[in-house]
Amino acid sequence: MSTQSYVKKNFSLAWPLALNGLLMQSMLMIDTFVVSPLGEIPLASMGIATTIIAAILGIQMALANGTQLVLSRAVGAGNNLSLTKAFWSGLLINCSAALLFWVLLTLFDRPLINALTDNVLLHQEVKDYLGICKYIVLYTALTQVMIALFNSLGKTQIPFKGYLIELPINAVVSYLLIHGVEFSASLSYAGMGVQGAAVGSIIAIILRLCYLALIMKLNREIQLPKPKFDGMMLRNIQQHFIEIFPVAANVTILLIGATIYQLLYAQLALHAYVAITLMMPWIRAGTQFIAAWSHSSAITISQAIGSRKIDDLSKNVDTSIDIAVGISLIVAVIFAGISVVIADIYPELDEQTYQALAIIAPLYIFLPLVRGYNTVHGNILRALGKTTAVFKINFTGQWLISIPLCALIIIGLDGSVFWAFAIQPFEEIVKALPFRQLARKSLKEFDQEKAQKLMYD
């Protein structure tokens, strides 16, 4: 595959992935918007419950992303039997994890809520909301593996259309269920309050699930008969799990690490903490574009490994890294523009908050450059079968170096917001060299024998 064809293919995969990520984030923003008229207690309750669910969905997505690599190799090999086994293995693993999380939320919801907040006014509200919202985990297990299948086939527009269906339905149905509707004096619905947001989300995701299932059924290219669960299939499930588990573990530690960062930042002065909180949604949104390109690169590289067309592997990896850095540079320029107009975006803040935003501006402008470099390396290394090595680099960089250093700066040294927030780009710098060295070494050693070992059949 020529460089031009490789880039064109990756961009055709990447833009729906990027928009998917933005739509997923906007769904939470919509729920927050429609719940906000109910007041602080319902809003805080929803915030706590959705934080729990979002963490679980992040792990489910990571498992599906691991399955996506296995599926992509099968697509590249043109082996429908391997594709079938990979799909059902991934579906079984993700559904088993979802069922486990559902049981844990059912049995231990109250201790978990008590640990997250000591405000007794919130406890029952959170429990009621979580009691409905936890079913999202079960439906998402199905949709995430379906999405991984479509992505591996290069049909990333189909999941994107699914989100386009889900988003407006979620917004309208949630609003009606939350606030109610009055058709006439004798015909009206009072509304469910904050629980309506959870029911609306479930209705919307069920419709998206039906849409994806219908497309799978109507698409003649997709033939995935239920396999026999014999010794070979069980071995396939075991190997599948061994490969994708480090991906889920990696996302889990990063999610927990991000939470710990936020808890540490909460120890700063109020205006400093508010400044960081205001910028985090922008940072997450900017990351979506870099992540989308990285995932599309991993899909294309996995397909090449499956087809045994690895002669241009190093050249294509270099191209992916160069373009990821270019996208990161564009995001950094956008962040620089945001820093100039931040007072117009968030008017009527205290002067001290604007000062804190100005202090951390160079850091959040620089952050996407090094984070984008690491993101593309991490996804490419996973495509090469180095999921455990990626986990080790992330764990060492974040948990053994950066988080302890952040705690020392904030709690031990009473450092400023600049040095506290500087730990985030510092963490990425710490991980950059190991990622690069491992990628160079892995590409140099990668051959047809290693490509064969990644195939389970």
Image (tube, rainbow, N blue to C red):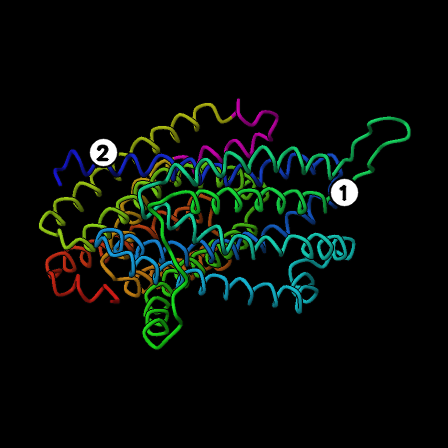
403 up-or-down from 366: above or below: below
The percent position of residue 56, horizontal first and vertical second, equals 53, 57
The percent position of residue 158, horizontal first and vertical second, equals 41, 39
- Indicate the quadrant containing the C terminus: top left, top right, bottom left or bottom right: bottom left
- The part of the chain drawn in magenta is 343-361
Query: Could you say which is closer to the camera, residue 69 or residue 376?
Result: 69
Q: Could you tell me which secondary element the residue under label 1 belongs to?
A: loop
Examine the structure image and report whether residue 349 is included in the region drawn in magenta.
yes
Q: Give the amino acid at mark 1.
A: Gly
| Res. 52 image quadrant | bottom right
To which residue does mark 1 refer? 193
Examine the structure image and report whether residue 317 is included in the region drawn in magenta.
no
To which residue does mark 2 refer? 8
Image point (60%, 35%), residue name: 169
Question: In this rendering, would 4 be left or right of 216?
Answer: left
| Res. 31 image quadrant | top right
Query: Could you say which is closer to the camera, residue 245 or residue 393?
Result: 245
Query: Could you say which is closer to the camera, residue 206 or residue 301?
Result: 206
Image point (30%, 43%), residue name: 296
The secondary structure that dominates the magenta segment is helix
19 up-or-down from 98: above or below: above
Separation (CA) of disc 2 from disc 1: 47 Å
Question: In this rendering, would 404 be left or right of 124?
Answer: left
Q: Earlier in the sequence, mark 2 or mark 1?
A: 2
Image point (66%, 65%), residue name: 106
Q: Could you tell me which secondary element the residue under label 2 belongs to?
A: helix
Question: In this rendering, would 68 be left or right of 206?
Answer: left
